[in-house]
Amino acid sequence: MKKWFLFGAIFALVLVLAACGGNKSNNEANNGAANNGASNNAGSGAASTNVAVKAKNWQFDQKEYHIPKGTDVAISLESTEGVHGIEIKGTDYTVKNGSTTTVNIADAGEYEMACNVPCGTGHSQMKTKLIVK
């Protein structure tokens, strides 16, 4: 019985680690789509500002990002290690790995951006701030 429990625990650990494992060939293919103007959750028009977010296992490349309020902003996401996504809390905006989303937030304030792809043991701490002024 102990052998089955140990086998199950090791198998679960492998699955958790694989969820954040590098999918480099998929990331490179998706980056090509992002560079060709692919977007989701599109705003009202062409973005006048671009914000590039890079993510690696359990952290974003910056502690906060700044955008102007009431302006179309293109937010792109590149996962340099593992596979990640972004959810902007308090809005309906998400950014998928290797894509660009145009956002337009009318209300100034601080918004939490969190990884929305289960990416392993540090997933729940993978957060940053979006400052809208």
Image (spheres, rainbow, N blue to C red):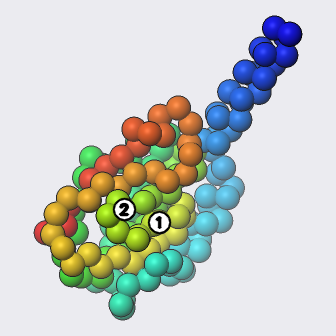
Near mark 1 (Cα within 10 A), the count class, few <14, some 14-19 or many ≥20, is many
Mark 1 → mark 2, Cα distance in angstroms = 9 Å
- Residue at 30% across, 54% down: 112
Is residue 7 found left or right of 124 in the rendered image? right
Q: Position of residue 16 (x, y in %)?
A: 65, 35
Residue beneath the point at 27% across and 47% down: 63
Horizontal side of 53 relative to 38 (left or right) equals left
Q: Is residue 127 above or below residue 5?
A: below
Residue extending farthest bottom: 45
Q: What label does residue 81 carry, if any? A: none
**Number of dots carrying numbers:** 2
SS label for mark 1: strand
Name the residue: 81% across, 8% down: 2
The quarter of the rendered structure image containing the N terminus is top right
Closer to the eye: label 1 or 2: 2
**Whether label 1 touches label 2, CB < 8 Å:** no
Q: Position of residue 61 (x, y in %)?
A: 36, 48
Q: Which residue is mark 1?
A: 95
Asked whether 27 or 114 is in front, the reply is 114
User: In this orientation, which residue lies closer to the viewer: 16 or 47?
Assistant: 16
SS for dot 2? strand
Q: Amino acid at mark 2?
A: Ile
Quarter containing the C terminus = bottom left
Percent position (x, y) of residue 57? 50, 40
Q: Which mark is residue 88?
A: 2
Q: What amino acid is at disc 1?
A: Val
Estimate how packed mark 2 is, as few (under 14), some (14 to 19) or many (20 or more) residues with alpha carbons within 10 Å.
many
Residue 123 seen: yes
Residue at the extreme front:
1
At x 45% / y 66%, what residue is drawn?
Answer: 94
